[in-house]
Image (tube, rainbow, N blue to C red):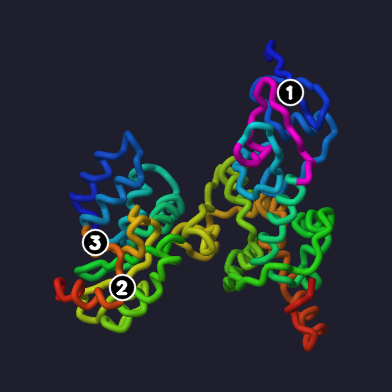
Amino acid sequence: MAGKTLQKITAKHKKGRNLVSLLKEVQDEYGYLPAQVMTEVADSLDIPVGEVYGTGTFYSFFSTQPLGKNIIRVCKSVPCYLADNQSVITEIQKQLGIKPGETTDDGEFSLQLTNCIGACDKAPAMMINDTVYSELTSAKISEILSNYR
Amino acid sequence: MNTNTIRVTLNGTEVSGHPGMTILELAQENEIDIPTLCHYPGLPPIGACRICVVEVEGSRTLVASCHTPIAPDMVIHTHSPKVLEARKVIVELLLASHPEACLVCDKGNLCELRKIAADLEIGLPRFKVKKRYYPLDDLSPYIIRDLTKCILCQRCVRACREIKKANLFAVAYRGFHSKVVVDQDQPLDKQACQSCDVCISLCPVGALAKRDGENASQETEATMSRVSGFGTEGVV
């Protein structure tokens, strides 16, 4: 599965051993972190697979499962929690018919909960792909989602 | 080697240590007992469990003595009311997500968590939170891993890396879901583990046990069934 792209990525990071930026490039390339690729990354950097897996599962922007075309990341950190992110999550669940961690059957949307995305002053916040949406209410959700349908 | 000495005030007494020494080492040298859990002599300290916290005047927070080096003119309190209260809460929090099944646990009175809880006079659980549950990992011919009991001290992770140089364990996931894993969270059934028993002997709780055999778990089952009806819930 690996191929030349992975070789290129690992070769670039071999010296610096910056595992996080390496995994980010892997995720950009494959859309997620496939198990086989994590094994190959570990081999090429000569570190235990567990270390790669540990890093890959710690950060909520990495995924070990394939994701949909549009990735919705709702912030679950305390400021957003206090600003009732639950109603946002519930509304998205209602509209898309998926729970956090799941992907719609048509592969259009993945719903994820994420750690702080730095929009605490405008909580509750979420990201869809690379765009931040803040001061969310359940009423705003359907309009936002329609931009991606 | 250490020509410099560092003078600090430890619980009101002036004592001296050498550069690079941790607060814990200095306290031990002066026969002051600070409880530890994740710390183990010879393994690199990581300050994971926080039980060894002490008060350093001028410091914004309590510091973990196992990995904080002494510095000139530090004023350290190892058993101030603030420290004792924090230590107690830390142990209570550890116990909150730990199974309340001491009476049927094979680790019994060898459990370091249980001893520390007793020393700090911690009674019935105050924090009621959900427990993590993991199925028993018993595929290995040598080790039975009961991660439901794991307190994430990472002694096994470090022992396997530093002593055995096998590096089989790592920590994965985050927060409440953190877990000591093998490879990509696979069961430990591989040839790589050569039954050195180092991790088992260092586990402070009952999370790692010798396979020897089957008896250990069968015994637990027998014990469990003897006390069934009583159940494991609420047994401290």
Q: What residue type is labelled 1?
A: Val
Residue stretch in magenta: B60-81
Screen quadrant of the C terminus of chain B:
bottom right
The vertical placement of A66 against B15, above or below, is: below
- Residue at 61%, 65% (x, y): give it: B147
Three-letter amino acid code at the position of disc 2? Thr
Q: Which chain carries label 2?
A: A
Neighbourhood count class around disc 2 (C-alpha, 10 Å): few under 14, some 14–19, many 20 upward: some
Which chain does the numbered disc 3 sit on? Answer: A
Say which mark, if any, is on residue A137.
2
Secondary element type, mark 2: loop
Mark linked to residue B8 = 1
- Callout 3 and callout 1 share a chain: no
Q: Is the magenta stretch mostly helix, strand or loop?
A: loop
Q: How far from the left and from the top, in percent, is residue A134?
A: 28, 62
Q: Is residue A37 left or right of residue B19?
A: left
> Label 3's element?
loop
Mark positioned earlier in the residue sequence (2 or 3) = 3
Cα separation, mark 2 vs mark 1, equals: 55 Å
Front label number (2 vs 3): 2
What residue type is disc 3 on? Answer: Gly
Cα gap from disc 2 to disc 3, whole angstroms:
29 Å
Say which element carries label 1: strand
Callout in the foreground (2, 1): 2
Q: Which chain carries label 1?
A: B
B201 to the left or right of B44 = right
Query: Residue at coordinates 37% horizontally, 49% vertically from top-left?
Result: A42
**Image location (x, y in percent) of residue B76:** 73, 32
Task: Give the residue at mark 3.
Answer: A31
Q: How crowded is mark 1: few (under 14 residues within 10 Å), some or many (20 or more)?
A: many
Distance Cα–Cα, label 3 vs label 1: 54 Å
**Mark 3 closeness class: few <14, some 14–19, many ≥20 residues within 10 Å:** some
